[in-house]
Amino acid sequence: MADKRSKTSRRAFLAAAGQGVVASSVVTGFPSIVPSSVFGAAAPSNRINVGAIGTGRISRGHDMPGIWKHDAARIMAVCDLDSKRVDEAKTLVNGQYSKQTGKPYDGVTGFGDYRALLANRDVDAVVISTPDHWHAIIAIHAVEAGKDVYLQKPASLTIAEGRALSDAVHRSGRIFQIGSQQRSWPQGQFRRACELVRNGRIGELKTVEVGLPGDPSGPEEPAMPVPTNLNYDVWLGSTPVVPYTENRVHPQNGYGRPGWLRCEQFGAGMITGWGAHHVDTAHWGMDAEYTGPVEVWGSAEFPASGLWDVHGNFKTEAVYASGVKMVISGAFPNGIKFIGTEGWVFVSRGNETVTSSDPAAKVFVQPLAASDPKILSSVIGPGETHLPESTDHHGNWLAGVKSRQQPIAPMEVGHRACTACLLHHIAMRAKRKLFWDPLKERFRNDDAANALLTRPQRWPYVVG
């Protein structure tokens, strides 16, 4: 838990920009606005100027491409605590816009301090693709700075952080999209599956099985010198100071799957990694997007040694107030199976991945299947439940920025999905049944479990 200084932490942290708390060796000024002739009909005055915060694997392979393909937006700034990655991101984005326009382009500015990026009034919106432990604090500062936000899932490192972020978003009135892109899957199978369930095509929903792999452990890692291009102390953020080793952070050459994903110091492992996607889809089909379970229990295998210490094989279960049970386990196929009194529907990504280093199914899994083919061909009538339709998650967010209408995956929805995942993670550690109040967002009569809703935070990187 943060000390008493946390009450003013956001103000103090923002005020420290440029005063040495987060030193930056990268340029902090913006070039002049590029002439409209460069982008044709999409004049600069009509475009959404976007800053990309975090320029690693998911940013380069998914988030920045999701933005730069839209004429309505322009990535004008990139930010990372690794100056090498800042330079490579600038080269990548400038090169992409040069290809699109057929002309030389050098309109992207690099930052080593996200607060300096947020302070620039030319930036309208930001895409946050950092490690999980930085999600909430950067997003809070972004909406407080008046920026619209696209945030990679999971929404937060802890449930308390997620609540603070959701409250900040709602106070700000900014347009916020969580990166639960299964809601906007181009083939539409996730929306289709949820509509079938919501409209009773499998009878009364009883159980949801979520297939989710664990992560393997790794060896002990010796301490290494911190690369001169990495601001490692700031990279650690709110978490404890530990020795640097490359497999704790990210590759210094290339953009493969980073080691921090397998360290509990920075996240909870696959239960929030892919779990945030699958549980969000489950909530969508359950009509439980703004609530959560009331009971949760389970167990998991955790490594006895080694640097990577997130959960391995596991099985957790939860019950919602509706009576629906959710079971999450790596023993199920990777996806979501809705089981009702009159049949079942299963939905997954099949063999598709978002980035080349994402875990993929070893055996092909049908993206959309049912106990009876007639379920899949069922027509949803005009008087039935029709879920919002989107086939482009980043595009859906940009449209919301223009229209000021909330996108398909708003912050509170993302917070509730992340909360459910974190509850399953807490149950893995507790190894006993826990009773949750989704309205108060507290465990019932369980001080030990409630202590896990937060983590100690290192000054000044605190969410107060």
Image (tube, rainbow, N blue to C red):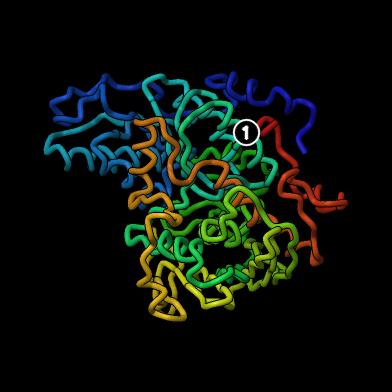
- Reading the image, the residue beneath label 1 is 167
Choose between 335 and 437: the one closer to the eye.
437
Label 1, secondary structure: give it.
helix
Q: Is residue 71 visible?
A: yes
Choose between 398 and 155: the one closer to the eye.
398
Q: Where is residue 459 in the image (x, y as percent from the top left)?
A: 70, 32
Tag 1: amino acid: Asp
Describe residue 237's horizontal placement relative to residue 436 as left or right.
Answer: left
Residue at x-position 33% and y-position 52%? 391
Image height of 203 relative to 96, above or below = below
Q: Quadrant of residue 315?
A: bottom right
Residue at x-position 17% and y-position 41%? 100
Residue at x-position 35% and y-position 72%? 377
Choose between 187 and 232: the one closer to the eye.
187
Quadrant of image for the C terminus: top right
Describe residue 343's horizontal placement relative to residue 133 as left or right.
Answer: left
Residue at x-position 66% and y-position 39%? 163
Quadrant of image for the N terminus: top right
Q: Where is residue 411 in the image (x, y as percent from the top left)?
A: 54, 41
Q: Position of residue 202 (x, y in %)?
A: 51, 72
Q: Where is residue 20 in the image (x, y as percent from the top left)?
A: 57, 23
